[in-house]
Image (spheres, grey):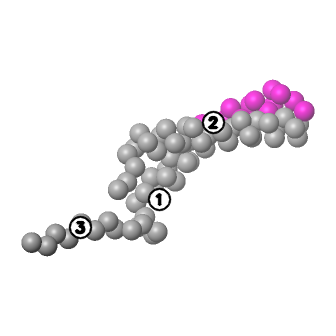
Amino acid sequence: MHDKHYRSIIKSITWRLTGSIDTTIISYLLTGDYKIALSIGGIEIFTKIILYYLHERIWNKIKFGKEQKSEPEYHI
């Protein structure tokens, strides 16, 4: 079983929203400037959605750590 592309896209967006809020807060705490913090958070949300999506799709093709589901045996 593998994820459909739209599932990977939705996961990418929701994860990035979470991460970007975190990045924005940390940026504000470090700089004390909300404009800089929002700029950093705003830019990285788009770049990291793309990176996460590509990462997810590549890992979806790698067999490492996946189990092959076998068909149940039926005896007559």
- Alpha carbon separation for disc pair 2 and 3: 41 Å
Q: Nearer the viewer, mark 2 or mark 3?
A: 3
Q: Is residue 60 left or right of residue 26?
A: left
Q: Which mark is residue 39?
A: none
Q: Which mark is residue 59?
A: 1
* Residue 40 x, y percent position in the rendering: 74, 36
The reply to whether callout 2 and callout 3 are in contact (CB within 8 Å) is: no
- Neighbour class for label 3 at 10 Å: few (<14), some, many (≥20)? few
- Neighbour class for label 1 at 10 Å: few (<14), some, many (≥20)? few
- Alpha carbon separation for disc pair 1 and 3: 27 Å
The reply to whether callout 2 and callout 1 are in contact (CB within 8 Å) is: no
- Alpha carbon separation for disc pair 2 and 1: 21 Å
Give the residue type that dot 3 points to.
Pro
Residue bearing mark 3: 72
* Residue 17 x, y percent position in the rendering: 63, 36
Residue bearing mark 2: 17
Q: Residue at x 52, y 53 (%)?
A: 55
